Image (cartoon, coloured by chain):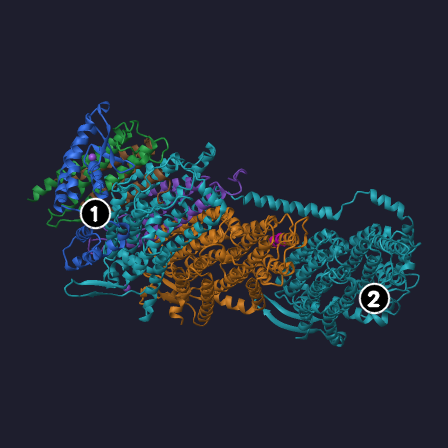
Chain colours: A cyan, B purple, C green, D blue, E brown, F orange
Amino acid sequence: MSLALIAALPFLGALLPGLAIRAGRNACAASAGSVTLLALILLALKVPTVLAGGVVHTRVDWLPALGLNANFMLDGLGLLFALMILGIGLLIILYARFYLETTDPMGQFYVFLMLFQGAMLGIVLSDNILLLLIFWELTSLSSFLLIGYWKHLPEGRQGARMALAVTGGGGLFLIAGLLILGGIVGSYDLTMILAQKDAIQASDWYLPALILILLGAFTKSAQFPFHFWLPHAMAAPTPVSAYLHSATMVKAGIYLMARLWPVLAGTPEWFWIVATAGLVTMVLGAGIAFFKDDLKAVLAFSTVSHLGLITMLLGFGTKAAATVAVFHIINHATFKAALFMSAGIVDHAAHTRDLSRLGGLRKLMPVTFGIVLLASLSMAGIPPLNGFLSKELMLEEAAHTTWISPWAMGLLATTGALFSVAYSFRLLAHGFLGPPRTDYPAMPHDPGAGLWSAPAFLVLLVVLIGVFPMATAAWLVDAAAGAVTGQPVAVEIHHWHGLGSAALWMSLTATGGGLLMLGAFPRLRAVWGAAPRPEAKRLFDGLIEPLAAAARSLTGLVHNGSFNRAVAVAVLAIAGVSLWAFLGGSHAAGTRSLLPVDFTSLSVWGLMVAAALATPFLHRDRVVALLLTGVVGLLIAPLFAVFSAPDLALTQISVEVVTILLMLLALHFLPRTTPAESTFPRRLADAGIAAIAGLGIGWLAWAMLTRQPAFAPISHFHLAQSKPGAGGTNAVNTIIVDFRGYDTYGEIIVLGIAALVIFALSETLLRSPAVTRRLANLPRPREDGDRHPMMLVVATRFLLPMALMVGVYVYLRGHNLPGGGFVAGLVFAIAYLMQYMASGYEWSQARQRHDHHVLIGWGVLIASLCGVGAWVAGLPFLTSGFDYVHLWPLEEFELATAAIFDLGVFLCVLGAVLLALASLSRLALRTGEAPNTRPFDIDPAMRDR
Amino acid sequence: MEALLASLIGVLTFTGVYLLLRQRTFPVILGLTFLSYAVNLFLFAAGRLVVNAAPIIGRSQTYADPLPQALVLTAIVISFGMTAVMMILAVGGHLASGHDRVNTGDEPTEDAG
Amino acid sequence: MTLLIDIFLSVLLVGGGIFALVGSYGLLRLPQPMQRLHAPTKATTVGVGAALVVSAFGMVPQGGGISWHELLITAFLLVTAPISALFLAKTLILRGEDPAPLPDSGTGRPWSTLSSDPDA
Amino acid sequence: MLKRLFPHPYLTLTLIVLWFLLVNEWKIGSLVMATFLATALPHLTAGWWPDRPRIRRPFALAAYALLVLWDVIIANFQVARIVLFMPRHKIRSAWITIPLDLRSPEAITLLAGTITMTPGTLTADMSADGRALLVHALHAPDPGAVRDDIKARYESRLIRIFG
Amino acid sequence: MILPYALLFMSACLALALVLNLVRLLTAPTVTDRILTLDTMTVNTLALVILYGIWGGTGLYVEAAILLALTSFVGTVAYCRFLLRGSIIE
Amino acid sequence: MMGHWIIAPVVLPAIVAGLMIILLRGSLRLQRLASVASIVALNGIAIALLWAATIHGPEAYHLGNWPAPFGIVLVLDRLSALMVALLSALALAVVLYTIGSRWDQKGAHFHPLLQFLLMGIAGAFLTGDAFNLFVFFEVLLIASYGLMVHAGGAARTRVAVQYVGFNLIGSALFLIALALVYGVTGTLNMADLAVKLPDLPEGDVALIRVAAVMLILVFAIKGALVPLQFWLPGTYANAPGVVAAMFAVMTKIGAYATLRVGTLVFPPDLPATGDLLSTLLFPASLVTLAVGAIGVLGATTLPRLAAFGGIASMGTAFLALSAFTPQTTVAALYYILHATLATALLFLVSDLVTRRRAHARLDQATAPIAGSGLIASLYLVAAIAMAGMPPLSGFIGKLLILDAFRDQAPLVWTVILVSSFLMILGFARAGSTLFWKPADSEAPPADHPPEAFCMTATFGLIAGLALLTIFAGPVTDWLATLADALDQPTGYIEANRLGQEP
Ligand code: NA
Ligand code: NA
């Protein structure tokens, strides 16, 4: 458990600074520091075990089915990295406390920092590569936040995005690579994977896995050609640069290569890819560093270069080279973090990091100078500092490695070292040596101990390791290199290898050459400045910005809000897919005997076809279009009647008229004509699409109509049970209110909701000033002066009760004959609408007792409760019951609970239709026009007119 | 007779889809109405065509399949509700924006009033 | 008796059919909009009336009773047809679709349809 | 009390008859239902028919109905003749103003309906004070005669019925 | 029995009438004519439905006819009101 | 056994909505109270149903006491119970957020419509009848139309026209498909279809294949699968934030229905259809994922970005569904759970941002928004979740899918990973503009009071994602049993008691 605890501690600790910041900046930093320290102590407790060659494991099952488990392990390599992460982390926390301004949100900083620390620690402690992936991506995320910490800096935003794009993107390659790796092995546990070298390297998937994994590692560790993001990440506050971009995060890629070294290394592919990338990165990074003026940029490219060095060493694939790599990881972390912190100090003091504006700081900032001096010399590889030790070993390895030709590697490695000397010395010379200047943006001075103690401690390590390598570092190198190579390592580190060692001469060449180069700086600088070279940011932006722009225009083009196109695409897709599906199966022509054509049907057919086909031509006059639609809708009714569906005929007729009323109400607010907007080719194309749809559906209808069902339809049950089981002779009605009453339940609720929606939207519309203005300005053609004609009112006085009676009749007979609650509700609604048309909505509604909402509510409630009522009898929802009642002197009659359900249907339909139409007519109430106070406008009986 | 119904369904679909491809809300709604006519008839056709056999028990010897009829009933009601909502949306869109185009993103700039 | 009813109903049907046809034909043939209004409101109503009567007595020859629903429809049509016609006429008047000029109402007030029109 | 129960007694009677027309069967249950509905529905709609027309001679109303029915049937043949056989240019359509002596809205509506249902004439509008009807005649070489005929044959009867 | 022939005759008349209605609907000079035609069409359809009911002898279609009568009236008045007043309910 | 409780998720919201309409129209406070109470109860019921489905296996509820396939049945199984639970959990977050943000004041009938929406969705999840599925689709759709235009506005209303119009086409297609199904087989009960379809005569195969693809296309419209996705960006981007969050579960209905129909009615081993559905869904879902990811990168406003994130998540979900194997189904369902919560979270965060910002555009900065630290963190979490980055469940879901599609690795992995990359880019660009980039000259917006209920809701969703992450093991184990049951649906079919007395 304890490894998991160590990994979890920073995450838990991430909560603290956010809270502790209320207690002050010291408390905030202390909270982060103490958590880190605690983790460090817990880690230290494991050191003996690891040094004794043991591997500490903690296993927690998380997602065993996938093989993703919270398995942790600690071996030498993990220990090395964990110590670095926590140790340097502790120093950074201290440093940052004094570095951040009071205006910077410190709580946030430490939260992000701790998140990062946890993620990084997770990477190096994971024994499961999927778990490692999770932490891997988390480092990308937290680094994104840290780089962008200074929100106001555009470089911060861009740098953060670039870093995330490169490392996050690389992480995606890594996902694929590790999944392949896990697939080859059959497990995602590192312990298992590391034991499967032969299987992995023999697999066909080895090369893809290798490339994908390396892409992940290279992007993270800023290896060529992915090195460009790191300098831009320098927009981050310096503690971040020191921590993430020199000591830890950028080494995650290195860690991964070292971690998988036992199973991936040793093949030509590995050598060629890794060593080459490392070599190129080393030389290139060092070269660029020499010409940079920004202190942090120098350090950034230097970091790139050193990471290249380590990568190259790992790429060699030998035990010795790997050991040197491990050693250099330690050394680089110490001097580079110290240098970054010092750069921050200079920036703080002089308000600039620009080497061309610095110089002469030696006297003004003696403490800082001391730190920088030692760290730079180490970086340059000057004895006896630790940088010298690992550089010598590196050159020795390079000298004995054949890459393209036997000497090419040695030559290039020496070149890299030479550049390294050059920029290290330049940093010293141009930053600190020479006479003090008078034109610093601010007068430089040494900071308080709070700021310099952390780099000083690191420099102390630089010196100690440099002087006493065997006492101070060898144990860690042995442990880590042992873990990397999988073999016991006992490193021998000496300052002097004798005159016969190639490294000595290479080193001397490098130092001398470096000094010469520094001397020639102005001239070289001019050449550099004139030479065309790719600028990373422009290249990256040149890649990403067009990508984003392309995405934007593509998205805008595809999702341009065109409904017509969406419909056209949908219709064609549906037709195409259906055709494809149809052709993929066998189809037999139907065998059903067909009905002879009768006269009535033929004429109705002809009318409907003609009306439908005329509509596309005449539709631009909207009243005409509505009339034609009405003709078609109306004529469907006799069609239903002919084909034995009286209930449908009733429903169709009543729905049709309500629809027409609704559309007329709506058309009042819309233009009366549709402008001619489509070109003839477009209309032709539309007609083509429509024809495809029509032919398709027509064909399907034909295919269906002419065949028998493959199995006996379930409706035989409904016909058989309609009377005995459901108590009604109208099988359609018993299906609606009983067998499938639940459908009807949903259906009336649809209608109820429709009305609510219409009401709600009309309310909203009336609240909008723009809408009310448009309503007041609706075009008003010449109008009838008689708003409520008397004769209509008088006729309605008779027709209304008649219609209501018809409604009641339709409702009551529905169970046994065509009709039912739905049609009855519509008939009632039509009757009421007649009244509204006659005397106006306001006048009529004022003399009425119910609110339409309540009707809908009761409808839903009655239908629901009728369903729930069955529970009382222990029966399922909507179970009906019926009985025949004898009540003298009446004839026998039937009482059925289905009638109660049908009453709910009735109420809901009535309420819904009335509410919908009332909402629309409310919109039409004209501003300033008072509602009528009498049922009709012209009353002949009034004497005084 | 079957051919009549099938072709009618096809023609109604044709008109419906054609109107759906117009650029104003009102014809689009009419298109949906036509489409729903076609679909209701198609659903009805799932019960096949029978004459003089209304599914009223005791009124004839054979009965038309009552189930598709019940389904069509449901479909008619639902499409009525949907049309109603679509209609008020069209009205709302027109009142709120001053025009009744159905495609967004191609409205002319002078559509303020 | 049965034969008599049969003949009577058949005559009704033939007559009703002709009237219905006349109504629809008149709609096409008559030149002025107001003239066209006459044809269907009456002729068609009579045609339908005939059909309704046949329907009401249709079962009598087979020994069934008289069906009274149809009477209701007839009554309904009689009540509604004039109102429909009135509204159609008002529409024609308002929109000025009939060529003939309107006479004066003789009461000093305009016809109601045009009463909101400032020119009236 | 009785007035409160039956705000429009003729309507109630009509509705009872209508119910029997609808259910098409003569049962006690139907009578109970008819009475119930014919009482309840007018109540439901009473607010929309605040005043009640007086019918002084209900039987004269029945006679009037038969007269109109007869006129409708007979005069339909005239319209058919005009529509089918009269050359278009010979059709003499005319607008006719009918000054009204009737004042009851119900009576005027009945008159207007009668005019429309009897062939050849059609009520097209009412004056803005409700004192005259605008009638269109399909073929009326003598418009004055048509007006007099309407007033004598129908309006006078209605005046007697409604008073 | 001549009744079936009479039925057929009237059906033919109505079908023909409907065709005439269609011609009118498509060629009508004014929108009022179209409304009138729709009204006529509905009534003709009503007659057809009645005839169909007589033919089948079931009497199941009378209610459809009642509704057709109701809707034809309401529809015609609504269309006219739309043309007369813009808003059919006010 | 749950008995009547199976229908409670349908009836309870309906009754509450009915009561709201009758009694509580005047008082928004009481409506809120009723709404929350109903949803809390729904959560309780959902948990009970989940428990029952886990313990007892599939159970049918015969409505009207009619035997299947003649009446309609509801079927409770792990899948339906899971979806109902997901729905009710999401609804709780949404209703709390609504109250906190006062979206419900901006128009009439928010709470009744929400209740009806819940009713419709729950009904769709629970039904065992194909036509009833249509009915409840319509219930949920029409409620969604109302919620979509809640609070009005020109752009919203106009987009709603498109949304409704397009869905009506979907409904029409659904009916055509159902007509074909009934016309060919004579039944509508899904279990009955599962029993009958293997015996389908050879000559009917072509028609039933058409019906099958039409059904899937209907679900694809709901699930915004390319090329039927055009309705989604506008709709989701213009819907009120809370509604868009609620809609996160609506696209999943398409996925649910596809899974149900694709495993029960037209399983891969059905001779008539074979791998028809897979062949259709696989390429479409890949393109959908790509379209969504490109949209995330190319989005011009935050709500649109969220909408395209939604499309991408549907592409991923359908991709995982398309194979119809137990392993992929587990991945799909886990991902669906994740994506629902994540999408909802993103929309809520998007609403938090846009309500505090002068405009929603991503190409122009505004003055820093009030409470930006907290909201930025919420955005970060939501973006991580949507982009499928660690440590949240999206990453695990993605790993599950990648692992399940090892056989088609080059294509599938490439699309998934490249899409992830584009989305990471898109979210990062948007986030840095929203929260980092300072505006040139705008005055800071008025102080926006912190909204306790809103925060409860968003943190609740985050907690959900965290739980899903932490308990990924137990969840996937549970889903594995579910997936096996879908693969061999005998339990589901037997629960219907076809042809026997209920
Ligand atoms: Na029953
Ligand atoms: Na007349």
Within 10 angstroms of label 2, few (less than 14), some, or many (20 or more) residues? many
**Rendering quarter of residue D116:** top left
Residue at mark 1 to residue at mark 2: CA–CA distance: 111 Å
Q: Is A610 positioned to the left or the right of A101 in the image?
A: left
The residue carrying mark 1 is D53
Is label 1's Cβ within 8 Å of ligand 2?
no
Using the image, determine if residue A64 lies above or below residue F360. Answer: below
Q: Amino acid at mark 2?
A: Leu
| Residue F419 lies within the magenta run | yes
**Residue A84 position in % (x across, y down):** 77, 67
**Rendering quarter of residue A15:** bottom right
The chain identifier of the residue carrying mark 1 reads D
Count of numbered tags: 2
Residue A465 appears in the figure: yes
The residue carrying mark 2 is A458
**Residue F231 position in % (x across, y down):** 49, 48
**Rendering quarter of residue B22:** top left
Q: Amino acid at mark 1?
A: Pro
The chain identifier of the residue carrying mark 2 reads A
Furthest residue toward left: C1
Q: Indicate the quadrant containing the N terminus of chain A: top left, top right, bottom left or bottom right.
A: bottom right
The one of A540 and A492 positioned closer to us in this rendering: A540
**Residue E6 position in % (x across, y down):** 15, 38
The dot on residue F493 is none
Q: Are marks 1 and 2 in contact (CB under 8 Å)?
A: no
Which secondary structure lies at badge 2?
Answer: helix
Give, as a single range, the part of the protein colored magenta.
Answer: F418-424
